[in-house]
Image (cartoon, coloured by chain):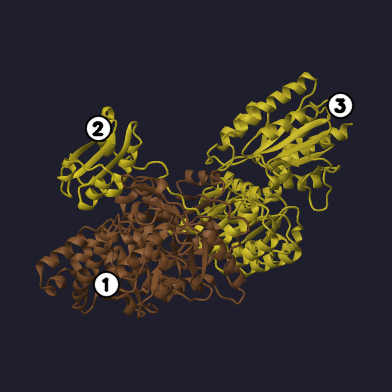
Amino acid sequence: MKKGKISDVFGKPLNVVNVGLESMAEAVKDQDVPTFQVDWQPPMEGVKHLRITKSGINIDEANEEVVKRIKQARPTLVGMGVAKDVIPGMHDRMILHAGPPITWERMCGPMKGAVMGALVYEGIAENEEAAEKIAASGGVEFSPCHHHNAVGPMAGIFSPSMPVFIIENTTFGNKAYCTQNEGLGKVLRYGGMGPEIYKRLKWMEAVLYPTLQRAIDSMPDGIDVKALIAQALHMGDEGHNRNRAGTSLFLRAIGPALARTNKDNEVLAKVIEFIDKNDHFFLNLTMPAGKAALEPAEGVEGSSILTVMARNGTDFGIRLSSMPDRWFVAPAGEVKGLYFPGFTAEDANLDIGDSTVTETAGYGGFAMAAAPAITQFVGGTPDMAVAATLEMYEINFSEHEGFTIPVLNYRGTPLGIDVRKVMETGILPKLNTGISHKDPGIGGIGAGILRAPEKCFKDAFDAFQEKYF
Amino acid sequence: MSVKTLIKTSEYHDSVSLMLVARELTEYPGVVDASVVMGTDANKSLLEQAGLLTPEADATTPNDLIIAVKADDAVAEKALEEAEKILSKKQTAGGEGAEFLAKTVRGAVRSHPEANMAIISVAGRYAAEEAWEALFQGLHVLLFSDNVSLEDEIALKKFAAEHGLLLMGPGAGTAIINGVALGFANVIPEGPVGIVSAAGTGLQEVSTLLAKNGIGITQGIGTGGRDLKESVGGIMMLAGLKALQEDENTKYIVLVGKPPAPSVTKLVMDQIAKGDKPTVMCFMGGDVTVADGVKNAMAVRTLQEGGLLGAKLAGADLPDIDQLIAKETAELKVEADKLATTLSDGQCYLRGLFSGGTLCYESQVIWEDLMSEPVLSNAPLDHAKTMKDSTRSEGHCTVDLGEEEFTVGRPHPMIDNDLRIRRIYQEAADPEVAVIIMDVVIGYGAHMDPASELGEAIQEAKAKAKAEGRELIVIASVTGTDGDPQGLQPQVRALEKYGVIVCPSNAAASRLAGMIVEQKAAKL
């Protein structure tokens, strides 16, 4: 903190922050002095302000290092590959899933559905029933995407032969992986099963993947996903539940290369149609971009910032930069949702997916103010979306200068969820998300909003305090 | 039961807003299911699964809007109309919950990087943390909250002083920074005198006395009452003094407080001597000889002397201060003798009812010199006795109604006159009471018209005493300026209208009150 002199303030216009009695501010306001009232609440009971660890680490400085690394990240789409070939630790009998580690028995319906569907798609099981037996009898190994530099939306199921995007953080050289987005509704990642799903997945493997791969391979610098996200935020996306602009931008970026590397115009047309009909195609790039940006920020001693926040439909889990291998989990929350025709809250599964990597990396729901078209999630008006983003600044350590929000005068998005701030203010991260049907085999039924559960933040805060104080 | 659809060609809505319309529509009486979607293939297949796909809907393009309802035949058409209404309903901008207030100091500073001052008045046990947050954000702090631990105060002040920040408080209710009244403070013109005060109403009394003599101030820095204790070491008094010494607009300095610990007095005098600005030490009731031989330093014993000496230094057309006060006292003596004759035989005591602790203290300093009998108080001078029960007056006594015992769970008597009004009636009913003296503090933060509220009560109390055959004397002074929202003159006139004798300073009021009871005692 820079040192000045008291006399430096003499003669300068006063701008007053008022904490406590509003009457104290009234008199100052009457003198035409700008006054900013703090909507103050007592901190959660027993929550201490943590600043310097017992070994002398200044937590703010550690956090500064974490957000510096995230801001420096340059996630770039550099190629594609097949999961078992490119994802570290992936093998023929491994299934990756969203969120913290979980056993088959504890998996929610849509995750089980997606696992069964994937086993049929892989040909490991002949049908869903056989798939269930294999899954239940230890015939496949389950592992969280986050343990393999990967992230998956909703159930987040990766099976060995699924094609994946390869994102390289060119600043640090690390890579992150994500599957291709199938669309909305009855799709595998929402727990859907059935022939039309396997057919689509096969087409994505046999046609979409090689077409995209050829195009990407022909682009010497790949596609700068960070730049696309930054632009999309200026076009009404927030990068999690709205990706209409990003998907369009992606098509523009890859368009010429697609045309140049493809011989069959009908194939090309089908690929473009598929992407065009799926507003969330870009989500499967914003997510690994976030993962690629966050991983180099792991392992900073004394940092209280989250580098992982993910759900598996049963549990909600977070990890801190300073304890990168330790999950803090709590029961996944109920989503306050809007539903597709024919579905209600009764049908909804609990919160699921790795897509909260977007909020962790400084966009997604935290950038709600940038996405006026989906403000219904937060109450209906753009003002409410602005309020939602402003609230998130309170629990984030920094602001991402690379991702700015026009309506906030190009202020950077909230970046770096600080477990200290969450505990001090009692403000829990506000997330928006898709909603799966709770039963296997049905798929996506809506979208909505919720707060992260307090327990995992409290546990992480306690563990942080135990380790450092 | 029937399924009806309404198609609106080339009408685009974002899917989320449409889902909201659908939800509202589903709640419409008689509607079983509803969907409002754009005519994409994916949406059509959803409609089909839900049994809502009509041939018209199937024929749409992705640019067309489909409103589909499954409902009782009677209401289906109406539901479609309703859907149109919901769709066209303009979202009112700035709806409920739209205004966002930062939840933390940090958040407020992030949104308003121009912020440079924090006023903190949260409960004491949380106040230190908020003060830390504010200091870390580079804000100067007026810490109004009480009950901050001594350890916290010392640590906060050390940090603030090291970083060139003001940490005014804890328990600091008054400051004037760059002409802005913070907390309880008056509208004082700009001028050459800088004040640092460890006493809130002390700062108000001195600054208003300057203003009453046509002199203005640069800054009025509060330090909180404990600053001058040995343990705190006068950190903010010294930092404030130094800042004023560095400030080119400040030509003269007045320091205000109760007498500091000897070690602190020495530090203060050393700092005064280091500078080149005439500095008045107004440490009430303190030993004035401490300033002897110290460069730039002058010491006085009352707020009145502090204010007048400051004004004189700064060029107010005043004679020698000692002579001035002697002359005023002589005039007050004449009036006191006259007033004493109106009293009945049993009326012999003085009762002080103060809202400002420093003014209550100044009065005691004056009475100690003036009166033959002690005046007890709930907030006595260091060496004096505390009154037995502060809610029940006995003999000569003076009560600081702003003390914590009176303000827990109740507004401060500068904001709310009820407590003092009840006490006025209580004292007036006592046949032994000769004189009630009180302060009326106006300015920002204070009640908007204390003179009228108190005055009406005083008038009634005097009338009751009169009915019982006694003349009750009520004396007051108004700490304020003509620039204050309440206005000094209107407040003085109102008090006089209700029969209150108004003196130009608390010191003068105290002398008059003291001399009346002394004169009465002498006659007996």
What amino acid does circle 1 point to?
Asp
Callout 1: SS: strand
Callout 3: SS: loop
For the residues labelled 2 and 1, the Cα–Cα distance comes to: 47 Å
What amino acid does circle 2 point to?
Glu
Residue B301 image offset from top left, x and y in percent = 73, 53
Residue A310 image offset from top left, x and y in percent = 44, 64
Chain A: what color? brown
What amino acid does circle 3 point to?
Asp
At label 1, counting other C-alpha atoms closer than 10 Å, the crowd grade (few under 14, some 14-19, many 20 or more) is many
Residue drawn at (29%, 74%) of the image: A76
Callout 2: SS: helix
At label 3, counting other C-alpha atoms closer than 10 Å, the crowd grade (few under 14, some 14-19, many 20 or more) is some
Residue drawn at (68%, 55%) of the image: B225
Q: Do the residues labelled 3 and 2 touch (CB within 8 Å)?
A: no
Q: Nearer the viewer, residue A64 or B230?
A: A64
In the rendered view of the protein, which quadrant contains the C terminus of chain B? top right
Numbered circle sitting on residue B345: 3
- Identify the residue position indicated by label 2 in the image: B81
Chain B: what color? yellow
- Identify the residue position indicated by label 1 in the image: A224
For the residues labelled 3 and 2, the Cα–Cα distance comes to: 90 Å
Q: Which chain carries label 2?
A: B
Do callouts 3 and 2 point to residues on the same chain? yes
Note whether A205 is above or below B149 in the view shown: below
